[in-house]
Amino acid sequence: MSSPLSPAAVDALRARTPGTRSTTHFNHAGASLPSSATLEAIHAHLWREATIGPMEAGVAGRQQTERARALAAQLLNAQPAEIALTNGNSHGWGAAFAALGPWRLGERILVGRHEWGGNLAVMRLAAQRAGATIEAIPSDADGTVNPDALEAMLDDRVRLIALTWMPANGGLINPAAAIGRVARRHGIPYFIDAAQAVGQFPVDVVEVGCDVLSGAGRKALRGSRGTGLLYIRQDFLSRLTPAFVDTHCAPLDANGEPVLRNDAARFELSEASLALHCGLANALQEAIEIGIGNIRPRIDGIAQTLRRQLAAIAGVTVLDQGVERSGLVSFNVAGLDAVSVQRRLAARGVVIGSNGVPYTPLDMESRGLKQIARASVSYLTTESETGKLLDEIRALTRQQSTGD
């Protein structure tokens, strides 16, 4: 039975995370703090490149690439052949979307209201060129995407269902598996953006029934920027032709014809940061060793407590929706825009995030929100850090009420 990490275990993890000694970090949903071992893995490969040559060091780096692939498959309940290593969540998601091929007049894309703005940009460009449409699936009163409403929208023109599992603008968790059951019944491709889910929430690609799932290394996994994971269900791979290839993912045969790889690595190119792959492999190993079953309840407990304490502060409005929630806590402070809140807290040594409409445009516009402040927690977050964040927000609200 899983349980939150003990204080002693958290202290040990923090001792191995240099950033916890220099910052009060509440922007783990933007990018979390890597461990010393992850940093050392990256540095060790860069040193190999510097001392024996980058190409020669590539032998060891490629071994770590394959280790990262196997660990990612273990984390997601996939097969290694179904995992591609990318340079980020948006890159992986966009590459898979582009590989679907050209769109046609009248075809439909159905998305959750919380779809990531970068994904919408990719979809809208393709839809505008072809005369396809993008439509939002209705949400329940609690904000989550409604699977029954999705089913009522389906017809033979629907070519893709896309869902952002955990939105960037708050703690809501969408019913990914329930949406997947609808998609599977009707044989419609199903893409999941799991950038915020991977590393803080159990992700089982078989259970959720997706064809494609993208994740980021820099968020809850505590890997480096410039790393990401792309899962592609093996039986779906043949339907995807990458928009760009090279001799790694589509080597030429004896006749000079490109032959696409028969695994997800058809979405990888020969030029990649092997040093970052080394770091990602270590970050994945750490996540597995800690256990998502232990990580999830700790993050949930911290986030729930933070929401209650923020809601008790006069002048603060907590904006999170959903019943089951993630470690992203969204709020606004009366009289201050979110960027000002972020900057003022940063001046006091507390790091949070802020999101505008472009991050999640359909949801922000639907709810009449222009900006949100976002405090995202990790299993590394301590009670004293939460106390400091709350104290500084109370100070901001007092300043607003007195006009200082």
Image: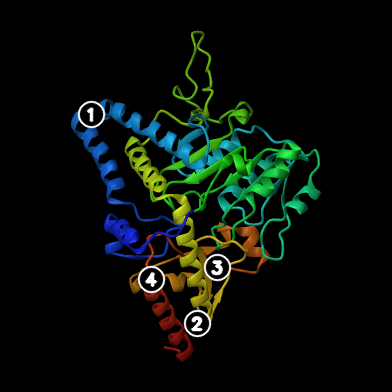
Q: Which residue sits at x=44%, y=57%?
A: 30
Which is more foreground, mark 1 or mark 4?
4
Q: Do the residues under discs 4 and 3 have CB atoms within 8 angstroms? A: no
Amino acid carrying label 3: it is Gln
Query: Which disc, if any, is residue 53?
Result: 1
Q: Amino acid at mark 1?
A: Gly
SS state under label 3 = strand
Visual colour scheme: rainbow
- Residues under numbered marks 1 and 4 in contact, where contact means CB atoms less than 8 Å apart: no
Left or right: residue 18 versus residue 227 is left
Q: Secondary structure at mark 1?
A: loop
Decide which of tag 1 and tag 4 comes sooner along the chain.
1
The three-letter amino acid code for the residue at tag 2 is: Ile
Q: Residue furthest top?
A: 254
Disc 4 element: helix
Q: Which mark is residue 383?
A: 4
Classify residue 369 by image quadrant: bottom right
- Sequence-earlier tag: 3 or 1: 1
Q: Nearer the viewer, residue 333 or 387?
A: 387
Q: Identify the disc placed on residue 313.
A: 2
- Looking at marks 4 and 3 on the same chain, the residue that comes earlier in the sequence is marked by 3
Badge 3 density bin: few <14, some 14–19, many ≥20, Cα 10 Å? many
Q: CA distance from mark 1 to mark 4?
A: 46 Å
Looking at the image, which residue is at 52% across and 18% down?
258
Q: Is residue 81 left or right of residue 284?
A: right
Which circle marks residue 371 in the picture?
Answer: 3
